[in-house]
Amino acid sequence: MAASELLKSRVENLRDYELVVILTTDTPKEKVEAILEGISKTIAEKEGSFTEVNHWGKRKLAYLIGRYGEGYYVFIKMKAKPSSIRKINSDLRISEQVIRHMAINMDEE
């Protein structure tokens, strides 16, 4: 197998990720579920899936982010391809309800 083929096959393998999303506290429950459904569809398109979803609920932020002192936290463990994570990051970055988010590749520990 050529080096470029090996690299391409490695890059598109499913990997374990953890994603934390902090939403505004005034986000309706239906909108929270719609955001999670969008993330789920994005990773399912490339054979990924959620392995765990925890709603941590409303918590005080360590410091103000914009005008927000509190946020609604959602923690997600998932199996996804790197290209799915890039799309999720892009989608969450433009969402008005998302204060902050972070996806971590757990395979690189």
Image (cartoon, grey):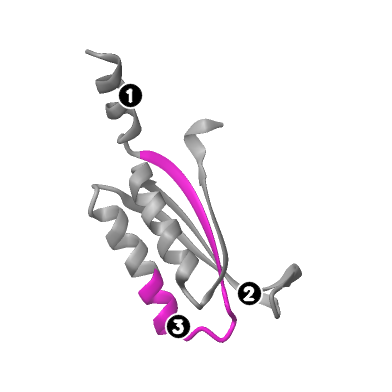
Quarter of the figure with the N terminus:
top left
**For residue 57, what is the image quadrant?**
bottom right
Mark 2: which secondary structure? strand
Amino acid type, label 2: Gly
Task: Look at label 1 and name its amino acid.
Answer: Leu
Residue in the picture at 29% in, 48% down:
48
Residue picked out by circle 3:
29
Q: Are marks 2 and 1 in contact (CB under 8 Å)?
A: no
Q: Nearer the viewer, mark 2 or mark 1?
A: 1
Dot label at residue 7: 1
Figure check: 43 above or below 64: above
- Residue found 34% across the figure and 46% down from its top: 83
Q: Confirm whether the magenta stretch covers residue 70.
A: no
SS of the residue under disc 1: helix
Residue at image point 46% right, 70% down: 94
Q: 98 left or right of 16? A: right
Q: Quadrant of residue 67?
A: bottom right
Task: State left or right for residue 69 relative to residue 19.
Answer: right
Precedes in sequence: disc 3 or disc 2: 3
Q: Residue 55 versus residue 18: which sits nearer the camera?
A: 18
Which residues are the magenta region? 15-35
Q: Position of residue 75 (x, y in %)?
A: 52, 60
